Image: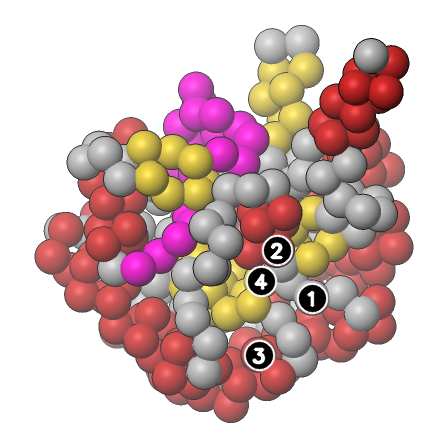
Amino acid sequence: MATLMEGAVVRRYSRWDGPMKNAFTVDVEDYFQVQAFADVIDPARWDDYQPRVVANTTAMLELLGERGVAGTFFVLGWVAKRNPDLVRQIARAGHEIASHGMNHRMITAQSADVFRSETRDSKKLLEDLCQQAVVGYRAATYSITKKSTWALDILCEEGFKYDSSIFPMRHDYYGIPDANPLPHRLTTPNGARLAEFPISVLRRGGLTIPVAGGGYFRLLPYPFTRWALRELNGASQEFVFYIHPWEVDPGQPRIEKAGLVSRFRHYQNLKRCSARLRLLLGDFEFTTMRAVLSQMGLLDPEV
Ligand SMILES: [Zn+2]
């Protein structure tokens, strides 16, 4: 009986043979494509801006390479079309290629038909380049909200096995505050099943604290981020960390006409980001999102 009980405890906590691993993810897009600048930069003019995404993604690959960490790169189709070698280089380095859509338009601003064709095209483009199945999706600006859950059905129909677009908090651009914050299998409006890895948050005392990367990682002191992420792992919860290539590029051209809040969000602490990433990679164990979801039993075995 004692053995059985011990066995139950071991099964609960030994999902990983060694230390628990978390998902390291990179949204591969350039500095002029972010939502914070969408009101001052017309997507039709993107080609006029100095591209920095190849150099910055290469810097990110070097950072991960130093630690021997594989991550998931959600690549924007627009970037992949112009930089096919970059996609091949990411895949060759042993990382997972996933889709960040085609044109970085929020799903909430798209029709179902446009969403379907752009999502299909971006998947095929990436698969042709990396010669591996692309099964993961992250929406531009986390734009799966209560108004756009229809998109989850389209993702299933187009062959995706997991999504990582739901931010379980309130924000001016995105969020489903009452969404399940842990990785899970969700049921789409049409009744299909899809693995979801929501952006990790720490819930404490009625507060929802975003601790999983991007602007929050740059704005909050690193010891706070480390504490919060250790709290999650300490509670046997795998987390996702996300970052963008432009966040390790303090020398990027400044978009002066953007508003004060947008500039603060985008430019704060860019100089500190690489050093913090090195600390993070030393303090936690990471792998691809696909590997974490598989280990959790949330993906079908053939994936
Ligand atoms: Zn993005």
- Position of 4 compared to 121: left or right? right
Callout 1–callout 2 Cβ contact below 8 Å: yes
Number of the front mark, 1 or 2: 2
Read off the residue under disc 1: 70
Q: Does the segment drawn in magenta span residue 174? A: yes
Read off the residue under disc 2: 291
The magenta region covers 159-184
Question: Which numbered tag is attached to residue 86?
Answer: none
Read off the residue under disc 3: 91
Name the image quarter holding residue 24: bottom right
Label 1 and label 4: CA atoms lie apart by: 7 Å
Is the C-beta of the residue carrying label 3 under 8 Å from the nearest atom of ligand 1? no
Near mark 4 (Cα within 10 A), the count class, few <14, some 14-19 or many ≥20, is: many
Near mark 2 (Cα within 10 A), the count class, few <14, some 14-19 or many ≥20, is: many
Label 3 and label 4: CA atoms lie apart by: 10 Å
Identity, as a three-letter code, of the amino acid under mark 4: Thr
Residue 240 image offset from top left, x and y in percent: 62, 45
Q: Earlier in the sequence, mark 3 or mark 4?
A: 4
Read off the residue under disc 4: 72
Residue 49 visible in the snapshot = no
| Residue drawn at x 39%, y 77% as measured from the top left | 127
| Residue drawn at x 84%, y 47% as measured from the top left | 18
Residue 274 image offset from top left, x and y in percent: 78, 63
Q: Earlier in the sequence, mark 1 or mark 2?
A: 1
